[in-house]
Image (spheres, rainbow, N blue to C red):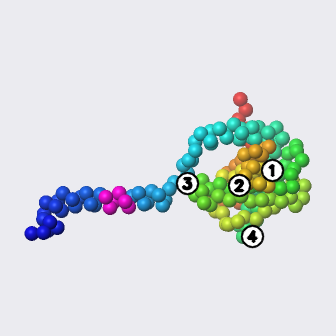
Amino acid sequence: MPWYRQFWFWFIFGPLIFIIVLCCFTVSIAFNYADDVVTDNYYKSGVMINQTFKQDEAAAALHLVAQVKFDQTTGEVIVALSGDHSFPKNLLLFLDNPVKLKKDQSVLLTEVSAGQYRGELHSPVEYSWYIALVPESDVSKRKQAPWLLTGEINLAKTTETTLQSRANSKPAE
């Protein structure tokens, strides 16, 4: 009788072959559907947190507040910025999706009047987003911006939100 018709061969190697196929399948799933939520470089993120705190404190010192409105039909973003500071001609609005890194986008906002800015979304946004507003026109200079306003929005519930310094939103001690 040939080896492939032997009971003991399949009894011993059958489960091993099954496990190897299952492992290959699991590894392919792990690489194709990697988790975007996990940060790859914790050290770099930890070092940059001090810069974020400085930007936040600068925004609080300038009493900066931004009203952000999303127009879902036209894909337009309208920002009204107020505070004790002269405002730049351009702002960058970062929309960070809490789940999918590929959905993150930045919107260049141009000044249409004093403290009023307008920009166009690259793709439609829905559900929850983290929002950051900086006075830069270059995406790579996000971390070097003099101030930073942050907030969150759930577009399933509302199309408007207020961005402010986290230092302003802390309860008084």
Which residue does the numbered mark 4 point to in the structure image? Answer: 74
- x then y, percent, for residue 138: 77, 54
Q: Residues within 10 Å of mark 3 (few under 14, many from 20)?
A: few
Q: Residues within 10 Å of mark 2 (few under 14, many from 20)?
A: many
Q: CA distance from mark 1 to mark 4?
A: 24 Å
Q: Is residue 28 left or right of residue 86?
A: left
What's the residue type where badge 2 is placed?
Phe
What label does residue 36 carry, if any?
3
Q: Residues within 10 Å of mark 1 (few under 14, many from 20)?
A: many
What's the residue type where badge 1 is placed?
Pro
Which residue does the numbered mark 2 point to in the structure image? Answer: 94
Which residue does the numbered mark 1 point to in the structure image? Answer: 135
What label does residue 46 carry, if any?
none
Residues drawn in magenta: 20-25
Q: Is residue 56 left or right of residue 28?
A: right
Comparing marks 2 and 4, which lies closer to the viewer?
2
Q: CA distance from mark 2 to mark 3?
A: 17 Å
- x then y, percent, for residue 119: 78, 62
SS assignment at label 4: loop
Q: Residue at x 39, y 58 (%)?
A: 26
Q: Nearer the viewer, residue 106 or 168?
A: 106
Please identify the quarter of the rendering in which residue 102 is found.
bottom right
Q: Is residue 86 left or right of residue 3?
A: right
Of the numbered discs 1 and 3, the one sitting upstream in the chain is: 3
Work out which quarter of the rendered image holds the N terminus and state it. Answer: bottom left
- x then y, percent, for residue 131: 69, 52
